[in-house]
Amino acid sequence: MAQTSEHSHVVLSPPVDKRDELLLKIRGQTAHLPDLRPIFQDWKGISHRHVSPWLEPLRDTVNQKIQSLSFSTEKQKRLERTDFALFTALWWPDTSPECLETLAYLVIWLFTWDDEIDEPSGAYSESLSGAQTYRDQTLRFVNSCLGLTDTAQGEHDLKPQSHIVQSFDVIGYALRSFYNESQLRRFGDEIERFMRASEVEQLGRLRGEIPTLDEYWSFRLGTSAVYIGSAVGEYSMAAHLPLHVMNSSAMCALWDETNIIISITNDLLSLRKEIKLGCLDSIVPLTFATTMDMNEAMALSVAALQASKKRFDEAARELLSEEPRLEPEVQEKIREFIEIQRSNCVGNLIWSLETKRYDVSGVRNNDQSIDFSL
């Protein structure tokens, strides 16, 4: 009788993807999310909600814009529940109704553009080549709308196939009607940074790679699109700050910390939703990958948020310390710009807590912290 190999009955399982392996370790864990509002208690908008008085009429405008983009009924309702009007009215509460409308269109454009690549159901989520074509066509059209391309190329790209890309036209023309060339180029550069970071993030995800925290931050500050929000700060306040002020190290630090604050806030509040969708590219899962302790990962992420807020205040003080050398009108505009950046941070937090975009639910404790299962 022939001998049967002792391994002949063993069925080999396919190798486990590193990302799936980490996801399995995270699922079932309990996360403790402290109340983040006290971190910003000395900033406007925490003790009393600071929101644009034009919120309600803006909601009608936003919903009309969403309906014009021809999404499925399900996606349209989901986008309406996201409440982009509240987002815009909290980020830029003191701007004019005309600027507020343009900024709302920009917010809708950024969210819907990113969904095509970032969401599992997005048209280009699993296609790097398709996404790259989408990114390249978007950049050409954006630069055309901003007047940053030659006429021949601009005419060629005025009618992109994507209705999402096309919807940038009203945004670009509004910015072009007010911004000077350096402001337009700064904005255009931030759109390009956003697109290139999107490519890096998608490539790593499709390869099944788990980035280190340093690698994560190298693309996260681009994919967050927060720099784009900072690049329309002057538009929201109808100002042209001096180039040397906008290029100063203190201003760059202010932009960086605004970005880090908003990115960590989003990562913490969206954790449950992201894990449910199988998404790992955020600060808590990547910290957990090194600590293997969810409580520690959450605590370290909150500590990073607190440290960034402290660095923001230091950058603001440094920026204001240069005031004696500047005209009084410029000094006042710098203070206003700093307050807009703070509104971006606080507004983002309040919007995240008030809307249903993130599933921030669980057992609420007396100190307003939340414990929830992943």
Image (cartoon, rainbow, N blue to C red):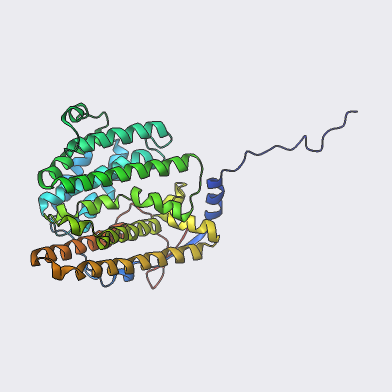
Q: Is residue 94 at least partly visible in the picture?
A: yes
Relative vertical location of residue 57 with respect to residue 362 in this rendering, above or below: above
Dividing the picture into quadrants, the one containing residue 323 is bottom left
The quarter of the picture where the N terminus appears is top right
Foreground residue among 80 and 318: 318
Q: Residue at x 39, y 49 (%)?
A: 219
Q: Position of residue 15 (x, y in %)?
A: 62, 41
Relative vertical location of residue 15 with respect to residue 22 in this rendering, above or below: above
Foreground residue among 282 and 12: 282
Q: Residue at x 28, y 52 (%)?
A: 227
Q: Position of residue 19 (x, y in %)?
A: 53, 47
Q: Is residue 102 left or right of residue 229?
A: left
Q: Position of residue 162 (x, y in %)?
A: 27, 31
Relative vertical location of residue 123 with respect to residue 339 in this rendering, above or below: above
Foreground residue among 232 and 254: 254
Q: Is residue 328 left or right of residue 192?
A: left
